[in-house]
């Protein structure tokens, strides 16, 4: 009976904080995104009573979600005068991230272990030209048991300039 839930509003509030530091051959960035959903318990109860034909039947929703991370890199070419003169850069970097879409749940909903993930990443960013970067990184994604941790290697090239004047 959806009439019972007609006054359920499910208001969403999202907050964000981020920073970036660029000086002394160091680049550091960080962020925190935090979300809140009111009436998560009522919305979850309503979802559990949806028919089996619905797109996502019987889904719990959290009252709070979080995503946060920090990254820092150092330009090692800045220490080599020949490469520094060419304006090339080679950043060694590390990054840590945590995200959890079920960070906090109402009392009648059990937290979902699959929703939390931590990532540890290390790699290099090579800038042969100002607007071109060649990237290589290794990442380890840690999940709660019984879910399997994931490791990956990523290599890519990016261009960050404009194609027109």
Image (cartoon, grey):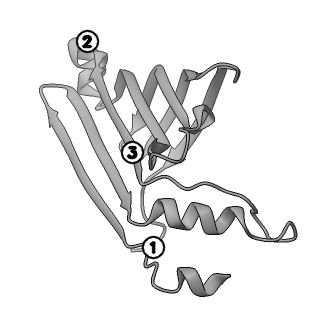
Q: Residues within 10 Å of mark 1 (few under 14, many from 20)?
A: few
Q: Dividing the picture into quarters, in which one does residue 93 lie?
A: top left
What residue is pinned by disc 2?
80
Front in this rendered view, residue 136 or 88: 136
- In the rendered image, residue 155, in percent from the top left (x then y), is placed at 62, 30
- In the rendered image, residue 111, in percent from the top left (x then y), is placed at 53, 38
Q: Secondary structure at mark 3?
A: strand
Q: Secondary structure at mark 2?
A: loop
Q: Is residue 104 left or right of residue 59?
A: left
Q: CA distance from mark 1 to mark 3?
A: 39 Å
Q: Residue at x 60, y 63 (%)?
A: 45
Q: Is residue 99 left or right of residue 68?
A: right
Q: For the view shown, which residue lies furthest in the top direction?
A: 80
Viewer-side label of 1, 3 = 3
In the rendered structure, which disc, 1 or 3, sits on the residue that comes first in sequence? 3
Q: Is residue 84 above or below residue 101?
A: above
In the rendered structure, which disc, 2 or 3, sits on the residue that comes first in sequence? 3
Q: Secondary structure at mark 1?
A: loop
Q: Residue at x 55, y 56 (%)?
A: 61
Q: CA distance from mark 1 to mark 2?
A: 34 Å
Front in this rendered view, residue 62 or 125: 62
Q: CA distance from mark 2 to mark 3?
A: 40 Å
Q: Dividing the picture into quarters, in which one does residue 162 lie?
A: bottom left
Q: Which mark is residue 66?
A: 3
What residue is pinned by disc 1?
164
- In the rendered image, residue 15, in percent from the top left (x then y), is placed at 27, 58
Q: Is residue 66 above or below residue 124?
A: below
Q: Dividing the picture into quarters, in which one does residue 154 lie?
A: top right
Work out which quarter of the rendered image holds the C terminus and state it. Answer: bottom left
Front in this rendered view, residue 26 or 5: 5
């Amino acid at each position: 009976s959806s009439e019972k839930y007609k006054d359920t509003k499910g208001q969403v509030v999202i907050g964000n904080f981020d920073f970036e530091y660029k000086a002394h051959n160091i680049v550091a960035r960080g962020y925190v995104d935090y979300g809140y959903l009111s009436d998560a318990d009522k919305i979850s109860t309503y979802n559990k009573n949806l028919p089996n034909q619905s797109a996502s039947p019987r889904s719990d929703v959290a009252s709070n979600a979080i995503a946060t991370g920090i990254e820092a890199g150092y330009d090692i070419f800045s220490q080599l005068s020949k490469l520094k003169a060419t304006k090339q850069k080679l950043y060694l970097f590390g990054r840590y991230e945590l995200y959890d879409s079920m960070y906090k749940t109402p009392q009648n909903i059990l937290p979902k272990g699959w929703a939390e993930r931590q990532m540890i990443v290390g790699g290099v960013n090579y800038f042969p030209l100002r607007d071109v970067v060649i990237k290589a990184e290794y990442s380890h994604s840690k999940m709660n048991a019984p879910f399997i941790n994931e490791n990956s290697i990523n290599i890519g090239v990016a261009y960050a300039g404009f194609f027109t004047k």
